[in-house]
Amino acid sequence: MKTPQVHATYPKTLQCKGGLRVRLRPMQAGDLDAVRAFFAALPRADRLFLRYDVTDATAFESWLPQLDNPRQLRLLAFSGARVVGHALLEPERHNWSPHVAEARVVVAQDLKRQSLGTLLLRELVDQASVRNYDKLSTHMMDTQVVARKMCERAGFTVEAELKHHVKDLDGNKHNLIIMCCNLDEAWHRMELLLEDFAPWAG
Ligand SMILES: CC(C)(COP(=O)(O)OP(=O)(O)OC[C@H]1O[C@@H](n2cnc3c(N)ncnc32)[C@H](O)[C@@H]1OP(=O)(O)O)[C@@H](O)C(=O)NCCC(=O)NCCS
């Protein structure tokens, strides 16, 4: 059986389904404008369910002090100079869960459905292993059916549903779904999903 191969050096090129190639690397302070442009261009339907108001141009500056945190990883996918994907691995804030991290992925509207979301999730699984996490969680509202499907295909299962626990940016209440995976299982599952094309192109 294959074991996880961690490609920890950046930048690296990911090849998506259909041949799209994107460059992946951790966010740097100089990326703020490109990151703002990426989030500003998201369709309202996607922005509605983000945890922060990305139309507030100052929202991203609070990310900068954490860019050097070795327990966290904020990755950007670039097509040319344009940011087309964002992936975040974030430690659980509770001291009693030092072995758990949360994964979040967002993909530009025009590049959806080309496996970029799954590849970014896989990258977070790899990087969570490097950081010695055992378990990965992802949180979403009940209406985020595409996110749920992507995570299910990648080996995450629903572990909790908290009723009327969160509000979207319009103020409407939703159930919060918490999906989790064991890292080894997720890695093997994603290898199978992605084996029909070459994600690690260089
Ligand atoms: C969820 C999201 C990241 C998926 O990105 P993506 O690059 O389109 O995902 P993938 O191409 O890897 O799709 C993975 C699977 O999800 C499912 N899926 C994706 N888009 C779908 C759609 N519009 N309708 C139905 N199923 C869909 C499919 O099963 C797909 O696999 P397939 O194309 O082989 O059938 C993207 O839709 C997004 O950014 N949504 C807004 C932010 C969000 O909800 N993030 C999730 C929080 S973790």
Image (spheres, helix red, strand yellow):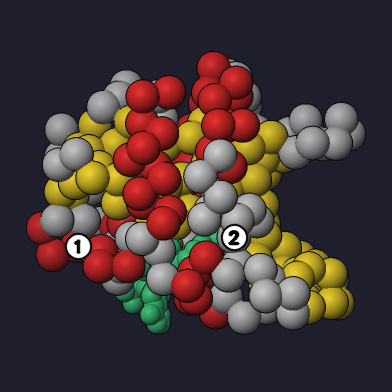
The three-letter amino acid code for the residue at tag 2 is: Leu
The three-letter amino acid code for the residue at tag 1 is: Lys
113 relative to 44 in the view: left or right: left
Quadrant of image for the C terminus: top left
Total label count? 2
Query: Residue 114, how many percent across, how many down?
Result: 25, 65
Q: Earlier in the sequence, mark 1 or mark 2?
A: 1
Residue at x-position 26% and y-position 27%: 11
Q: Is mark 1 within 8 Å of ligand 1?
A: yes
Closer to the camera in the image, 124 or 174: 174
Closer to the camera in the image, 58 or 159: 58
Closer to the camera in the image, 143 or 200: 143
Q: Is mark 2 within 8 Å of ligand 1?
A: yes
Residue, disc 1: 17
Query: Residue 63, how many percent across, how many down?
Result: 57, 32
Residue at x-position 75% and y-position 38%: 92
Which residue ends up furthest to the left in the rendered image? Answer: 19
Identify the element where label 1 is drawn: helix
